[in-house]
Image: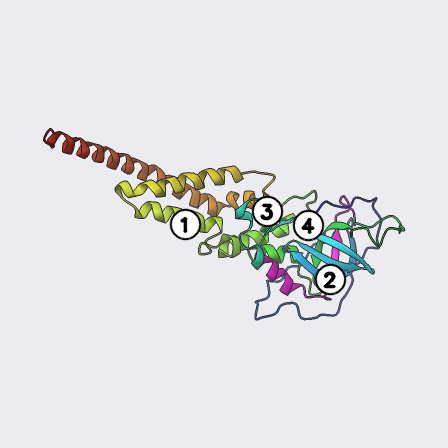
Amino acid sequence: MRPHRYTTPMTALALGALTFTGCGLLGGGQEEPAETTPTATPTEDLTSARIISVKDADTIVVDRDGATVIVDLMNLATPQARHDNPDIHCLAEESTDYLTRMLPVGSPVELTYDTALGTGTRPSPTESAATEPPPTVTAGVTLPNGKLVNAEIARAGYGVATHDGASLYYDQVSQAQDEADQKQAGLYSRDMACTLPAQLKTATNNLTGAQGLDLKDPLEEATQLTGTLAGYEKNPDLPLLASIVETQSVKTQRAALTRAHESKRVAYTVAEEAEREQKAKEASASPPP
């Protein structure tokens, strides 16, 4: 979840790569994500931190130089359990669990900031600092082995690339997202009922498997789903869903559903007309009272 950000003047931090000692990053037999190394530029600010907790799949809490900081993962949108749209709930628990396994409490990370967004550093301590909420910063999060957490979430199929006022890691997250799409992982699964690809698969199968008057419900289901997906296109308020419906594989599924809908709508119309004619014949053949 991305809370309202604490806005402060930019405080310059020392540049440079920091080396950490490794610790266990994944548990429970979870396969490690593929190697990914972030690309640094001279305009980045870097600092070290340790994990305090994971709030959800794109938000963590860290200890940075003895201060608690909330970190939104840069250029990433993920499922959210608390959202008005039920399609955004899909795999929210699984994606959070995945990040929690990747970032156990106390593990070291390196934070990379885009200078345009700031580092979330307050200008000076205040008397009320102890009661103030922790500052929030948008950052890239890198593991000691060089893996970019932002991209690993997308590679597992639990997030998509977004522009959130920065573009530092957009390309890396987008490439990882494409890999998830190709593998039909996570949000691109055709077998997990809540995903958009799975919904498209089910609606298409229901249409193609129905005949005659039994087409009524599948046609209505397809019409509703098509309208829902159209509402997600380029929707700035729903970046996760907007990105998924724009991927080529999902576009191909939508096109297949549209073709099936057009074909079966004609078949249903013919079946309705045949039923009306049959009822008319039966009525005319009935003896008068």
Depth-wise, is mark 1 or mark 2 nearer the camera? 2
Query: For residue 23, what is the image quadrant?
Result: bottom right
Magenta segment range? 95-118
Q: Is residue 107 above or below residue 74?
A: below
Residue to which mark 3 is pinned: 83
Task: Determine the residue positioned at 51% across, 57% down.
Answer: 185
Q: CB of mark 3 within 8 Å of CB of mark 1?
A: no
Residue to which mark 1 is pinned: 201
In the image, is residue 99 part of the stretch drawn in magenta? yes
Q: Position of residue 65 (x, y in %)?
A: 83, 60
Dot placed on the residue nearer the N-terminal end, 1 or 2 = 2
Cα separation between marks 1 and 4: 32 Å
In the structure shown, which secondary structural element does the residue marked by tag 2 occupy?
strand
Can residue 260 be seen from the camera position used here?
A: no
Q: Could you classify mark 3 by the number of other residues whose Cα lies within 10 Å: few (under 14), some (14-19), or many (20 or more)?
A: few
Residue to which mark 4 is pinned: 74
Dot placed on the residue nearer the N-terminal end, 4 or 2 = 2
In the structure shown, which secondary structural element does the residue marked by tag 3 occupy?
loop
Task: Determine the residue positioned at 53% across, 52% down.
Answer: 90
Cα separation between marks 1 and 2: 40 Å
Depth check, front residue: 288 or 214:
288
Tell me which amino acid carries mark 1: Lys
Can residue 165 be seen from the camera position used here?
A: yes
Q: Is residue 126 above or below residue 144?
A: above
Depth-wise, is mark 3 or mark 2 nearer the camera? 3
Q: Position of residue 5 (x, y in %)?
A: 74, 45
Q: CB of mark 4 within 8 Å of CB of mark 2?
A: no
Q: Could you classify mark 2 by the number of other residues whose Cα lies within 10 Å: few (under 14), some (14-19), or many (20 or more)?
A: some
